[in-house]
Amino acid sequence: QVQLVESGGGLVQAGGSLRLSCAASGRTFSNYGMGWFRQAPGKEREFVAGINWSGATTYYTDSVKGRFTIFRDNAKNTVHLEMNSLKSEDAAVYYCAVAAGLFAPRRGSECAYWGQGTQVTVSS
C-alpha cells in the first residue's frame, strides 16, 4: 500500500523559512516524479513545485520561484520543499504527491497518490 506522510508544517513569521518533508513507502519512488501542491481556504488546490525521478528537472509556480526549492533523496524515499522568505499568501495546506511516471508533475491530474497534507501558517 502506497503511503505518503508529510511533516514540517507549522506557524512561521512572514519572511521566515520552513522545510517540508514527505516520506514515501509502498513502492520504489525513485522511479516516479514527485510534487508539492497547496490549497488555501476557499481556493482551489494549486501546483507549487515538481521534480522528476532523478532530481535533474524541477518546475515551480511563478509565485514561489527564487524562494522555494524542491529536492529529493531517492535513497531515503523522501522529497522536500525548502521554503524561504515566506509570505502570508503562502499559507495553505501543503500536499505531497507522486506522479504517474518519471516526469516532474505540474498538474494534480498527473499525480497518482497523495499525502494527507501539512498546514503552513504565516503570520504577518
Image (tube, rainbow, N blue to C red):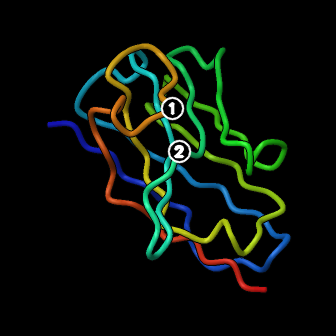
Depicted 91 relative to depicted 32: above or below:
below
- Amino acid at the residue labelled 1: Arg
Depicted 51 relative to depicted 121: above or below:
above
* Residue bearing mark 1: 106
Residue 5 percent coordinates (x, y): 36, 52
Residue 26 percent coordinates (x, y): 22, 32
Depicted 114 relative to depicted 85: above or below:
above
Residue plotted at (84% across, 43% down) = 66
Quarter of the picture containing the N terminus is top left
Q: Are marks 2 and 1 in contact (CB under 8 Å)?
A: yes
First along the sequence among labels 2 and 1: 2
Mark 1 neighbour density, 10 Å: few (under 14) some (14–19) many (20 or more): many
Residue 76 percent coordinates (x, y): 47, 31
- Marks 2/1: CA–CA distance: 6 Å
State the residue in front, 9 or 121.
121
- Amino acid at the residue labelled 2: Phe
* Residue bearing mark 2: 47
Mark 2 neighbour density, 10 Å: few (under 14) some (14–19) many (20 or more): many
What element does badge 2 sit on?
A: strand
Residue plotted at (79% across, 86% down) = 124
Tell me the quarter of the picture where residue 83 sits.
bottom right
Residue plotted at (64% across, 33% down) = 71
